[in-house]
Amino acid sequence: MRDFADYVNDFEAVMQEMILPDCPPPYFVLAHSMGAAVALLSAARLRTQIERMVLTSPMVALPRGSPEFFARLSGVLMHLGLGESFVPGGGATIIQTRPFRGNPVTSDPVRYQRSVDIVDADPSVGIGAPTIGWLNAAMHASLRMAEPNFSAEVPMPVLMVLAGADTIVSNQAAEKLSRRLKTTAHLRIPGAKHEIMMERDELRDQFWVAFDAFVEGRR
């Protein structure tokens, strides 16, 4: 992975070749984490097609360290031919095989076990740690969203729903971006971990109430 522009191109191709020919409007985007970053980066190119976007736990930045530092460091490591290596401390072990206790994605043991069962049935859908190449691409995406002129690139209404107990992405960075984008608002769900839609019902229901109100607001 060298550039999130590849994902933006994929998103646009899906819209042009599958969604627009076969599905009637209006079109809404529901995207999570890295997908939310891709949606934001795609907004300028899809401005006449997408009516509203709801983004859960958007990956605007990582919770620790500056994007500039990680972009430079990962760039050096890629220059040394290490782009396909895992980030330090990471490996190919499938994340979903780790114990429920202390996991960073959900406080709901039933929904966590459902993910474990899916990966047990088909290990090819599991994911390991990120690579240095992915980290470099992600940091450049973060830097792009931090640019002053990016505020003009998201013309449609956007709702960011943040997980209050998120340790995977930076809520502070998402809130800062939300305040910069005139079309964007954010909502934080206290106690929720990163995978909001895999959370306990009392937390997930808060998301769906916000989602329904925001989408219905178009009327």
Image: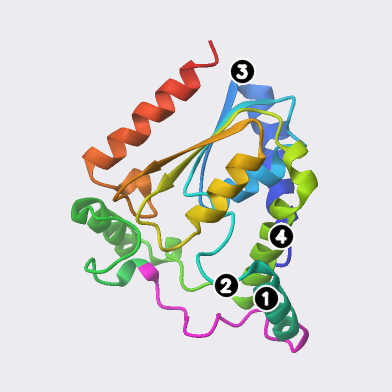
Mark 1 lies on a secondary structure that is helix
Do the numbered discs 1 and 2 sit on residues whose CB atoms are within 8 Å? yes
Q: CA distance from mark 3 to mark 1?
A: 42 Å
Of marks 3 and 1, the one in the foreground: 1
Q: Mark 3 packing: few (<14 Cα in 10 Å), some, or many (20+)?
A: few
**Percent position of residue 168, x then y:** 45, 63
Residue 62 drawn above or below residue 55? below
Q: Amino acid at mark 2?
A: Gly
Residue 198 drawn above or below residue 120? above
Do the numbered discs 4 and 2 sit on residues whose CB atoms are within 8 Å? no
Q: Nearer the viewer, residue 158 or 99?
A: 158
- Marks 3 and 1, the one that precedes in the sequence: 3
The magenta stretch is 79-95
Q: Residue at x 22, y 52 (%)?
A: 108
Q: Amino acid at mark 3?
A: Pro
Would you name the residue on which mark 1 appears?
A: 69
Mark 2 lies on a secondary structure that is loop
Q: Using the image, tell me which numbered label, if any, was put on residue 65.
A: 2
Would you name the residue on which mark 4 appears?
A: 143
- Marks 4 and 3, the one that precedes in the sequence: 3
Furthest residue in direction bottom, as rendered? 80
Of marks 2 and 3, the one in the foreground: 2
Q: Nearer the viewer, residue 27 or 69?
A: 69
Q: CA distance from mark 4 to mark 3?
A: 32 Å
Would you name the residue on which mark 3 appears?
A: 25
Q: Using the image, tell me which numbered label, if any, was put on residue 30.
A: none
